[in-house]
């Protein structure tokens, strides 16, 4: 019955027409983090402030601002995509959340299953995603965070509905900006949802409907015992290569690669052949990935960026548990 009654394309033509490419929508979301002027007040409930904004030619935004009793370090760790398995402890509407794929620290693909199909359908529609009949209660999100953005001391995390591969946007984005407050004892959270300008008239209605439940969920999330359960035990290490005064390290070579090397560029040690990397400029991340692949191990635990920032060529980021 719901399937036939809620024919969104018939009620609101073009509802899904604004879904763009992943990179374009992702950057739109990050630019929205810097929108500080022109917000129109909709509602205030306790410490929760709800505002709306017509932003640019394409988007309208709904912003919920709330103050959470927690430190920035603990709260940002709990919201990392790597901590997705504990998100069901954060919001009662989430029945299960799990990490599907990690592209880099602070950049991952997360699957969320909502507590009911109706909640799932509403959340999918708010994010502009067209769910199939069989997955009304689920959503796949690409979560990308940037530290010290848009201002020093702030952390911004974008959540964008995507396909199963994580490279094509399937809906509109949202983001959360975290900033420490009150001497570090609280965190101010700005939660922004983007929707197309053509349906911005829905924003005040959506804001009023979700204000009460949103405030209640954050109150539950701020409980110290819940936050303690959500901070992931694992982390990341930044490796650094130093004092390569005679050039970059040698790379192990497969037999098929030996014939393509100039004379004098090969070295043999313990029945193995070694040579310089022919891929151009040396980068420690690329070197470690190649070394792990040569040894028959997965290179998926080595990255060239951390929380949206690329490391320099002589550094690489690894999972702490994999390194130990």
Image: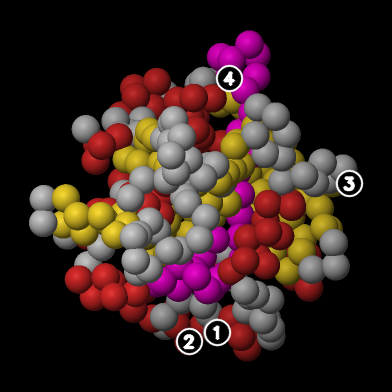
What's the distance in space between the residues labelled 4 and 1, CA to CA? 43 Å
- What count of labels does the image hold? 4
Q: Mark 4–mark 3 contact, CB under 8 Å?
A: no
Q: Which residue is mark 2?
A: 4
Please state the horizontal and vertical placement of residue 291, each as a whole percent of the image. Answer: 27, 54
Q: Which residue is mark 4?
A: 186
Please state the horizontal and vertical placement of residue 216, each as a whole percent of the image. Answer: 51, 36
What's the distance in space between the residues labelled 2 and 1, CA to CA? 6 Å
Q: Mark 2–mark 1 contact, CB under 8 Å?
A: yes
What's the distance in space between the residues labelled 1 and 3, CA to CA? 34 Å
Question: Height in image: 251 above or below 312?
Answer: below
Can residue 59 be seen in the rendering of this structure?
A: yes
- 250 vs 227, nearest the viewer: 250
Secondary structure found at label 4: strand
Q: Residues within 10 Å of mark 4 (few under 14, many from 20)?
A: some
Tell me the mark number nearer the camera, choosing from 3 and 2: 3
Q: Which residue is mark 1?
A: 7
- Quarter in which the N terminus is drawn: bottom left
Q: Residues within 10 Å of mark 1 (few under 14, many from 20)?
A: few
Read off the magenta span: 160-186
Q: Residues within 10 Å of mark 2 (few under 14, many from 20)?
A: few
Residue at horizontal 55 percent and vertical 84 percent from the top: 7
Q: Which residue is mark 3?
A: 38
- Looking at marks 1 and 3 on the same chain, the residue that comes earlier in the sequence is marked by 1
Q: Is residue 245 left or right of residue 89?
A: right
The furthest residue to the front: 264
- 24 vs 170, nearest the viewer: 24
Disc sitting over residue 126 in the figure: none
Please state the horizontal and vertical placement of residue 99, each as a whole percent of the image. Answer: 33, 53
Q: Mark 4–mark 2 contact, CB under 8 Å?
A: no
Can residue 298 be seen in the rendering of this structure?
A: no
């Amino acid at each position: 019955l719901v399937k036939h009654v809620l024919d969104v394309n018939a009620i609101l033509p073009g509802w899904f027409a604004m879904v763009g490419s992943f990179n374009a929508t992702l950057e739109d979301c990050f630019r929205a983090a810097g929108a500080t002027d022109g917000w129109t007040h909709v509602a205030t409930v306790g410490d929760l402030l709800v505002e709306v904004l017509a932003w640019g030619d394409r988007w309208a935004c709904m912003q919920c601002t709330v103050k959470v009793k927690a430190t920035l370090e603990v709260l940002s760790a709990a919201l990392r995509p790597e901590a997705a398995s504990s998100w069901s402890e954060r919001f009662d509407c989430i029945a299960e959340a799990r990490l599907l794929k990690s592209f880099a620290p602070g950049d991952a693909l997360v699957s969320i299953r909502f507590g009911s199909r109706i909640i799932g359908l509403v959340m999918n529609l708010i994010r502009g995603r067209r769910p199939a009949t069989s997955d009304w209660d689920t959503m796949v999100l690409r979560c990308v965070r940037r530290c010290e953005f848009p201002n020093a001391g702030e952390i911004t995390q974008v959540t964008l509905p995507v396909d199963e591969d994580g490279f094509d946007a399937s809906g509109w984005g949202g983001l959360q900006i975290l900033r420490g407050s009150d001497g570090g004892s609280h965190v101010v959270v700005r939660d922004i949802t983007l929707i197309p300008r053509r349906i911005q008239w829905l924003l005040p209605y959506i804001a009023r409907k979700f204000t009460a439940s949103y405030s209640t969920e954050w109150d539950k999330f701020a409980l110290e015992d819940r936050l303690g359960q959500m901070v992931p035990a694992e982390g990341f290490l930044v490796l650094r290569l130093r004092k390569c005064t005679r050039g970059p390290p040698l790379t192990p070579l497969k037999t098929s690669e030996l014939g393509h090397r100039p004379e004098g560029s090969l070295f043999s040690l313990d029945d193995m052949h070694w040579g310089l990397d022919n891929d151009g400029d040396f980068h420690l991340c690329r070197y470690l990935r190649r070394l792990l692949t040569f040894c028959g191990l997965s290179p998926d635990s080595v990255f060239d960026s951390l929380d949206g920032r690329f490391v320099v060529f002589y550094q690489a980021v690894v999972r702490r548990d994999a390194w130990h």
